[in-house]
Image (tube, rainbow, N blue to C red):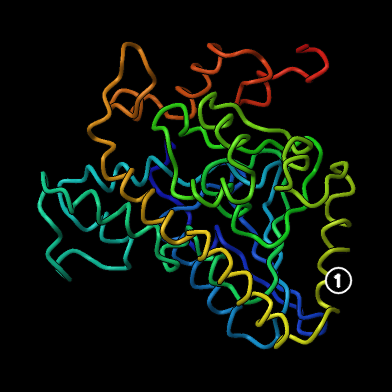
Amino acid sequence: MGETTRPSAEEIILYDKDPSTRIATITFNRPDHLNAPTIAARRRYGELLQLANIDDDVKVLVIRGVGDDLGSGADVPEVLEAVAAPTDGPVLAEWGLEEGDVTYPPRGTYRRNAMLGTWYANAQAGCRSLQEFKKISIVEVKGYCYGWHFYQAGDADLVVSSDEALFGHPAFRYVGWGPRMWTWVQMMGLRKFQEMVFTGRPFTAQQMYECNFVNSVVARDQLEAETQKYADACSRTRPTDAVFLQKTFFEVMKQHQGEYMGSILSGLLESFSRYVKPDSDDLMLSRDVVEGGINKAVKNNDSNYPPDFRLSKNARVPEDDAE
């Protein structure tokens, strides 16, 4: 990402609540980096969800982003820097630990890589935290909803989107999978999600609405009002005890469908990533790509695809023009 000093977790993840309406808001606030959360910010996000889960002043949680986008994924360069660091302190930050607190598995062992992938299945890691949230969650999507932010949309109870939003995961083109694979199948349907994975293309808000992933699609200037309409309605439904029971029902249903098992499985896929070799000139997370900028590499790779399959908003054309 080209930063020497990253913002604090408190600067990136903002939290506010209104006890009079019992609506709380988490706001991603790093628009100059497409709202990418750092390791510390992901941990803060998970902690805030736990806080809102316990707080009786909160019945509904709205999740949104500052700027033009919800977000384009986590701060991947920071994670790669941590994994490649000569000492274990940076990667131990994932667990809120410091150098010397524990002895991390040595390099070259399977569990060193597997430890991190498995961690992302834990609600405390800030990736699948919404799955264990017993209040009503609403994700407000605009612009990019890629990567880690796509995780949140998949795990939320409701998704309200602006009509120009794009959903997907750039990693499908340079890794091949992501931690919420199983949930995306559950929420999108197998056929459509396979299309997203195998082509690597993003889906528009309307396409996500048509496969039942998104609840409402509106013009950008109507987005906040539409989200507020849903939040107000949810805050006035049955008592919070009833919401807790409803969420428990849905959680049991998702676990019957294998949601957590899928999280463990995708962690297993992550742990095998070092064994995936390029066929020829495939885009991979090589040292050159990381040093040159992942975002730049993904954008350059975009030109290999039809305009309506491209990840970058600027490189795309309206669907009508692509036919």
Q: Nearer the viewer, residue 200 or 195?
A: 195
In this picture, is 37 found above or below 63?
A: above
Quadrant of res 176 = top left
Residue bearing mark 1: 232
In this picture, is 299 found above or below 273?
A: above
Q: Nearer the viewer, residue 202 or 243?
A: 243
Q: Nearer the viewer, residue 309 or 47?
A: 309
Query: In this rendering, would 121 be left or right of 159?
Result: left
Query: In this rendering, would 243 be left or right of 87?
Result: right
Q: Position of residue 72 (x, y in %)?
A: 57, 40
The amino acid at mark 1 is: Asp
Query: In this rendering, would 28 be left or right of 286?
Result: right
Query: Mark 1, residues whose alpha carbon is within 10 Å: few (<14), some, or many (≥20)?
Result: some
> What's the residue at 56%, 71% (across, down)?
252
> What's the residue at 53%, 71% (across, down)?
132
> What's the residue at 66%, 47% (across, down)?
70
Q: Position of residue 285 (x, y in %)?
A: 34, 29
> What's the residue at 32%, 68% (across, down)?
96
